[in-house]
Amino acid sequence: MIRLLALLLALLPLSALAQPVGTPIVIGQSYKLPSAIMGSARTINVWLPPGYEKGAKRYPVLYLLDGGVDQDFHHISGIAQLGTIVGTTRDMIVVGIETVDRRNELAFPIATDAKLKADYPTAGQSDRFRRYLAQEVKPWVEKTYRTSGESALIGESLAGLFVVETMLRAPTLFDTWIAISPSLWWDNEALVKAAPALLSKARGRLWLSVANEQGMGVAPFAALLKDKVPATLAWTYAPCPDETHATIYHGAALAAIRQLYPQPSQ
């Protein structure tokens, strides 16, 4: 009997005999912060560059919309980490702001598209979310971390719409704007139509891209920028015709961050 048991054990794969004990891979820290504006605690995820704890250096902050762990936090913080490791981009802090009801939080009120309004009755509270960023998220980040005063807002799709709207309606809230395939089609391109009256106050740097999509409202907005852009706004329009709405984000974000935050020459 003992010899039979020994034979059976010998036939088992090593993995069945001894499973190694794994350790968690931790990328960043997650916080539940109370929010009076949003009416409940909200999740903020933060990635700090290597060596942050050892020095006194101050860093630019990349504020990421849809920044939940199950949203875009890992792949955008991964871009920042790669830039640090290989020395292609400046070190930065990545702050992921998790969204819960994206159409409610990232889109402005629907005024003309009745079907859109019927389909998404909770949509249209982007102004409240903007106040949340301005009055609660940014002050907490600036109090908690060594920030340099440089701040960027990045988002794709509806989050990209929010980036463009914020650039136009709250132009001093951030100094850099990264809008990737922004949903400027929202409410019959209402933001594109409103832009001529708002662009004069735009400032900072805008990096704009779109995939091989029709009817997004991005091309008309880019054409408007050519005619109406003020001297206070430096902008780049970098379409990605080989990408789809589902595939554009990572590569476009990498290109934007490399262009906007290059590592200074030694």
Image (cartoon, helix red, strand yellow):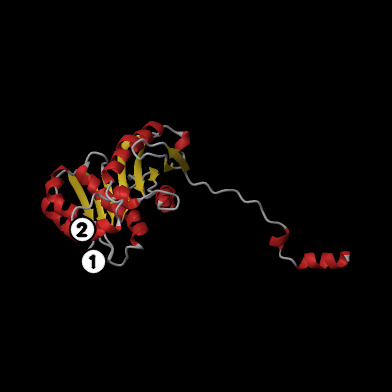
* In the image, residue 240 above or below residue 34: below
Q: Quadrant of residue 37?
A: top left
Give the number of the disc on residue 133. none
- Give how far apart the Cα atoms at labels 1 and 2 are: 18 Å
Foreground of the two, 47 or 106: 106
Q: Position of residue 157 (x, y in %)?
A: 30, 56
Q: Quadrant of residue 142?
A: top left
Q: Residues within 10 Å of mark 2 (few under 14, many from 20)?
A: few
Q: Residue at x 71, y 61 (%)?
A: 16
Position of 120 compared to 196: left or right? right
Foreground of the two, 57 or 141: 141
Q: At numbered mark 1, what does the secondary structure look like: helix, strand or loop?
A: loop
Residue on which the image places disc 1: 214
* In the image, residue 239 above or below residue 176: below
User: Of the residues shown, which amino acid type is indicated by label 2?
Assistant: Asp
Q: At numbered mark 2, what does the secondary structure look like: helix, strand or loop?
A: loop
Position of 264 compared to 112: left or right? right
Give the number of the disc on residue 113. 2
Q: Position of residue 61 (x, y in %)?
A: 35, 41
Q: Position of residue 207 (x, y in %)?
A: 25, 52
Which quadrant: the N terminus?
Answer: bottom right
Foreground of the two, 40 or 263: 40
User: Of the residues shown, which amino acid type is indicated by label 1?
Assistant: Gln
Q: Is any part of residue 28 visible from this angle? A: yes
